[in-house]
């Protein structure tokens, strides 16, 4: 019987290629199907005899209880679903076709250039793009979305991610570690995509929801017993293990880290609540030392936890789990939080090439602490003398300058790997320096600030570096649309024009200027001043 063209083939009559890839088979008037014609494949129909379905609704058998090894990676991690349960997301006709050679290139970009900045997952060096696609299909497509160099491909793949994420979580009620890992990657490098802050807010809440649904923020003994049993309502049964995998421990800590960064950036989100079990996860990562990147990851999580406490102290929350801010002056809490940062600093390997990652995060957290209870109003509070205010102003200036010195010494070729948190910290440091350069306070000498570090020259260097990073990203490609670095350069040009109106002509000591994009990280002075850190502009400065 002839089939009507332009409509899906009836049940049992889809071509063999579409059946194998679980794609919709759209017939053509000339014969065959649209997908096979587009891919120049031989469209073969199955035999006309229709096989009777043998599927039955049965109660699924509980998974085997096993103890995972301590060296869990994406190449050997067990999955709670069949390997191909998400494979249909790669058959969407809107998804650009990537060759396996391109997929390997983009996976290598993610592994070598991006993951070092936020190592909340471990990719085994031997795992291939094809193997990752089979074992972690959603993570794979998210890695492709943030690693492709073509802006057109980036837009199309990101749209496919969003469409399928909505379908999997909202329509099919999928609960899976693969979804969580992919979401965290998509969130952490949201600066690599064309989307607004609203997407960052929505996806962050979805990731936090997955952590709660999977019970990853609690121990196995308590977590799964308290997870809402959707299976009793006909949806899905929670997974059961006798022990957490290292992958799961990194995932829950990574969700805390990313959600906290997003919360500080957007100022309208709640961070994933810290639990005692997450302390245990940190201890396991420190004790096991499975991969070298875990050391940096642990430092980042600890520093972000201190940042959370600083924000809670600044807001005067008594349920912060740290201190009751109604019983002591602000200066006491600044000292206590600063001592916690010093403890983290003791574990930083200053001989490591990746030391600047921890130091940037450390400076950002410390500046946030110096900004507690702080505003541009030159009237000290009852528990804050004018001298203490000046000391904190100076500490903030020292810290902002140190952060920018480190950032400007990083090679522009590394910019492509930066997560959104680095750029958020960059803006905080710049705004803090600008505010300190224009602060109207009789006790604060703005001429000394401008004489040692001129924010206009720093903006010039940043603009040049962004333009250079954009050229590196699109090297060897035909430019069809502007990339993220070109847009960032335009943004900083607009900021420079507005700030120029409030600043006098620069009078800068040339010894303080770093050549744009010099890449000489080792030339940065690593002997930190007594007060190093930044003030988070989103919580500390009264705009």
Image (cartoon, grey):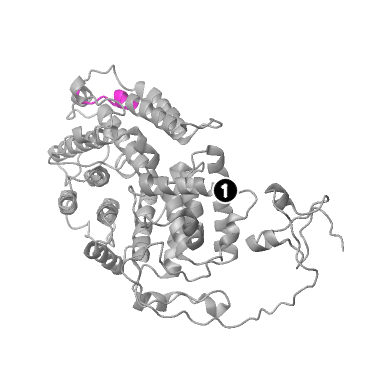
Secondary structure found at label 1: helix
Instruction: Say which quadrant the N terminus sits in.
Output: bottom right
Q: Nearer the viewer, residue 242 or 380?
A: 242
Name the residue: 36% across, 78% down.
242
Name the residue: 68% across, 59% down.
17
Near mark 1 (Cα within 10 A), the count class, few <14, some 14-19 or many ≥20, is some
| Magenta span includes 454 | yes
Residue interval drawn in magenta: 452-459
Residue 245 shown left or right of residue 39 in the figure? left
Name the residue: 21% across, 34% down.
397
The x and y percentages for residue 459 are 33, 27
Residue 291 shown left or right of residue 216 in the figure? left
| Magenta span includes 447 | no
- Residue labelled with disc 1: 159
> For residue 127, what is the image quadrant?
bottom left
Confirm whether residue 202 shows in the render.
no
Q: Main secondary structure of the magenta part?
A: helix
The x and y percentages for residue 218 are 35, 71
């Amino acid at each position: 019987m002839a089939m009507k063209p332009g409509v899906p083939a009836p049940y049992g009559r889809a071509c063999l290629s579409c059946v194998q890839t679980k794609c919709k088979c759209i017939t053509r008037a000339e014969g065959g199907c649209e997908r096979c014609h587009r891919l120049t494949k031989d469209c073969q129909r199955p035999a006309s005899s229709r096989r009777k379905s043998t599927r039955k609704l049965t109660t699924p058998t509980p998974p085997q209880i096993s103890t995972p090894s301590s060296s869990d990676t994406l190449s050997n991690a067990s999955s709670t679903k069949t390997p191909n349960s998400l494979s249909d997301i790669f058959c969407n006709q809107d998804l650009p076709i990537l060759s396996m050679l391109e997929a390997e290139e983009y996976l290598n970009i993610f592994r070598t250039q991006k993951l070092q900045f936020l190592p909340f997952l471990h990719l085994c060096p031997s795992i291939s793009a094809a193997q990752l696609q089979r074992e972690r299909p959603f993570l794979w497509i998210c890695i492709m979305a943030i690693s492709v160099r073509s802006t057109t491909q980036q837009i199309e793949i990101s749209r496919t991610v969003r469409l399928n994420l909505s379908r999997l979580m909202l329509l099919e009620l999928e609960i899976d570690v693969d979804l969580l890992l992919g979401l965290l990657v998509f969130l952490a490098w949201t600066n690599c995509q064309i989307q607004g802050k609203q997407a960052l807010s929505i996806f962050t809440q979805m990731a936090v929801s997955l952590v709660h649904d999977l019970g990853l923020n609690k121990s196995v003994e308590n977590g799964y017993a308290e997870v809402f049993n959707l299976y009793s309502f006909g949806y899905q049964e929670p997974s059961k293990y006798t022990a957490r995998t290292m992958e799961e421990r990194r995932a829950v800590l990574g969700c805390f880290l990313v959600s906290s960064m997003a919360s500080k950036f957007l100022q309208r989100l709640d961070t994933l609540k810290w639990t005692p079990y997450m302390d245990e996860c940190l201890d396991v990562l420190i004790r096991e030392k499975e991969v070298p990147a875990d050391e940096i990851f642990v430092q980042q999580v600890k520093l972000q936890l201190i940042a959370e406490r600083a924000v809670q102290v600044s807001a005067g929350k008594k349920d912060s789990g740290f201190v009751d801010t109604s019983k002591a002056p602000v200066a006491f809490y600044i000292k206590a939080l600063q001592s916690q940062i010093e403890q983290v600093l003791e574990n930083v390997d200053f001989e490591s090439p990746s030391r600047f990652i921890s130091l940037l995060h450390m400076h950002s957290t410390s500046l946030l602490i110096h900004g507690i209870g702080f505003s541009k109003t030159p009237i000290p509070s009852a528990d804050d003398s004018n001298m203490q205010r000046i000391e904190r102003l100076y500490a903030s200036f020292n810290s902002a300058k140190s952060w920018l010195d480190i950032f400007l010494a990083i090679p522009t070729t590394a910019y492509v790997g930066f997560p959104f948190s680095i750029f958020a910290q960059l803006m905080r440091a710049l705004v803090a320096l600008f505010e300190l350069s224009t602060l109207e306070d009789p006790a604060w000498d703005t001429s000394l600030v401008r004489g040692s570090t001129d924010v206009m020259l720093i903006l010039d260097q940043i603009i040049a570096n962004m333009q250079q990073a954009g050229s590196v990203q699109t090297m060897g490609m035909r430019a069809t649309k502007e990339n993220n670095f070109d847009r960032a350069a335009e943004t900083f040009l607009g900021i420079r024009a507005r700030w120029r109106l409030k600043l006098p002509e620069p009078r800068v000591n040339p010894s303080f200027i770093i050549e744009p994009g010099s890449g000489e990280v080792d030339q940065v002075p690593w002997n930190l001043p007594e007060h190093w850190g930044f003030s988070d502009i989103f919580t500390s400065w009264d705009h």
